[in-house]
Image (tube, rainbow, N blue to C red):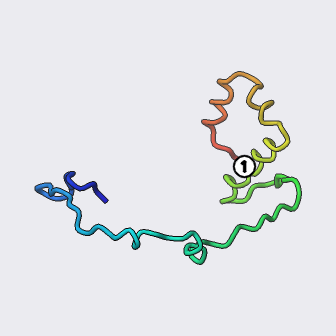
Protein backbone atom coordinates (compact mmCIF):
# COMPACT_ATOMS: atom_id res chain seq x y z
CA UNK A 1 0.00 0.00 0.00
CA UNK A 2 1.29 3.40 -0.91
CA UNK A 3 0.37 6.73 0.61
CA UNK A 4 -1.88 8.81 -1.63
CA UNK A 5 0.08 11.40 -3.54
CA UNK A 6 3.35 9.42 -3.61
CA UNK A 7 4.82 7.93 -6.77
CA UNK A 8 4.58 4.25 -7.68
CA UNK A 9 7.97 3.66 -9.26
CA UNK A 10 7.08 0.19 -10.55
CA UNK A 11 5.56 1.79 -13.64
CA UNK A 12 7.35 3.54 -16.46
CA UNK A 13 6.56 6.41 -16.29
CA UNK A 14 5.85 6.40 -12.52
CA UNK A 15 2.19 6.85 -11.54
CA UNK A 16 0.82 8.86 -8.66
CA UNK A 17 -0.86 6.73 -5.97
CA UNK A 18 -4.47 7.68 -5.28
CA UNK A 19 -7.20 6.67 -2.87
CA UNK A 20 -9.91 4.57 -4.57
CA UNK A 21 -12.11 3.71 -1.61
CA UNK A 22 -12.41 4.96 1.94
CA UNK A 23 -14.28 2.46 4.13
CA UNK A 24 -17.00 3.54 6.51
CA UNK A 25 -16.04 3.50 10.17
CA UNK A 26 -18.43 0.58 10.75
CA UNK A 27 -16.49 -1.52 8.19
CA UNK A 28 -13.25 -0.99 10.11
CA UNK A 29 -14.43 -2.20 13.54
CA UNK A 30 -13.36 -5.65 14.64
CA UNK A 31 -13.67 -7.48 17.93
CA UNK A 32 -10.81 -9.60 19.25
CA UNK A 33 -13.13 -12.62 19.50
CA UNK A 34 -13.57 -12.52 15.70
CA UNK A 35 -9.93 -13.57 15.28
CA UNK A 36 -10.04 -16.56 17.66
CA UNK A 37 -10.97 -19.06 14.96
CA UNK A 38 -8.17 -17.81 12.70
CA UNK A 39 -5.40 -18.26 15.27
CA UNK A 40 -3.36 -21.47 15.54
CA UNK A 41 -3.85 -23.55 18.69
CA UNK A 42 -1.90 -22.56 21.79
CA UNK A 43 1.47 -24.34 21.96
CA UNK A 44 1.70 -27.14 24.47
CA UNK A 45 4.77 -27.14 26.68
CA UNK A 46 6.40 -30.55 26.61
CA UNK A 47 9.21 -30.00 29.08
CA UNK A 48 10.28 -33.38 30.35
CA UNK A 49 13.19 -32.27 32.47
CA UNK A 50 16.61 -30.71 32.02
CA UNK A 51 18.18 -30.78 28.57
CA UNK A 52 20.78 -33.48 28.05
CA UNK A 53 22.92 -33.08 24.96
CA UNK A 54 23.07 -36.19 22.82
CA UNK A 55 26.40 -37.94 22.42
CA UNK A 56 26.16 -37.38 18.66
CA UNK A 57 24.20 -34.64 16.87
CA UNK A 58 22.29 -36.01 13.89
CA UNK A 59 22.42 -34.37 10.46
CA UNK A 60 19.97 -31.47 10.34
CA UNK A 61 19.66 -31.18 14.14
CA UNK A 62 22.77 -29.09 14.83
CA UNK A 63 21.13 -25.65 15.16
CA UNK A 64 18.23 -26.85 17.31
CA UNK A 65 20.50 -28.92 19.57
CA UNK A 66 22.98 -26.08 20.07
CA UNK A 67 20.12 -23.67 20.75
CA UNK A 68 18.69 -25.99 23.42
CA UNK A 69 22.14 -26.42 24.94
CA UNK A 70 22.69 -22.65 25.09
CA UNK A 71 19.24 -22.12 26.65
CA UNK A 72 19.93 -24.77 29.28
CA UNK A 73 23.25 -23.11 30.17
CA UNK A 74 21.49 -19.75 30.45
CA UNK A 75 18.82 -21.30 32.70
CA UNK A 76 21.56 -22.69 34.95
CA UNK A 77 23.23 -19.27 35.10
CA UNK A 78 26.33 -20.43 33.26
CA UNK A 79 26.02 -18.01 30.35
CA UNK A 80 27.79 -15.25 32.33
CA UNK A 81 30.71 -17.52 33.11
CA UNK A 82 31.07 -18.38 29.43
CA UNK A 83 30.88 -14.76 28.26
CA UNK A 84 33.32 -13.54 30.92
CA UNK A 85 35.94 -16.24 30.51
CA UNK A 86 38.95 -15.92 28.26
CA UNK A 87 39.90 -13.38 25.68
CA UNK A 88 37.20 -11.91 23.44
CA UNK A 89 39.30 -12.89 20.42
CA UNK A 90 38.73 -16.55 21.36
CA UNK A 91 34.99 -16.02 21.11
CA UNK A 92 35.33 -14.52 17.63
CA UNK A 93 37.56 -17.39 16.50
CA UNK A 94 35.06 -19.92 17.85
CA UNK A 95 32.18 -18.14 16.13
CA UNK A 96 34.00 -18.22 12.80
CA UNK A 97 34.64 -21.97 12.93
CA UNK A 98 31.98 -24.43 11.89
CA UNK A 99 30.74 -26.70 14.63
CA UNK A 100 31.50 -30.35 13.87
CA UNK A 101 30.71 -33.39 15.87
Q: Which residue is mark 1?
A: 66
Depth check: give the residue in front, 11 or 91.
11
Q: Is residue 28 above or below residue 81?
A: below
Task: Give the image location of residue 81, x and y in percent.
Answer: 80, 30
Q: Is residue 97 visible?
A: yes
Question: Is 96 on the left-hand or right-hand side of 20?
Answer: right
Q: What residue appears at the point 82 percent right and 52 percent down from the top-left corner?
A: 53
Residue 60 figure quarter: bottom right
What residue occupies the far top of the structure in this picture?
87
Q: Is residue 9 visible?
A: no
Tally the marks. 1
Task: Give the image location of residue 1, x and y in percent.
Answer: 31, 60
Residue 31 figure quarter: bottom right
Task: Give the image location of residue 4, x and y in percent.
Answer: 23, 56
Question: Is 26 on the left-hand or right-hand side of 34?
Answer: left
Q: What residue appears at the point 63 percent right and 38 percent down from the top-left corner?
A: 97
Amino acid sequence: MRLPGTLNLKYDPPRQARLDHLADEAELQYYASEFDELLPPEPVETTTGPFVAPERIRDGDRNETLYKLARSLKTKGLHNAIHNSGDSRDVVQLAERRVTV
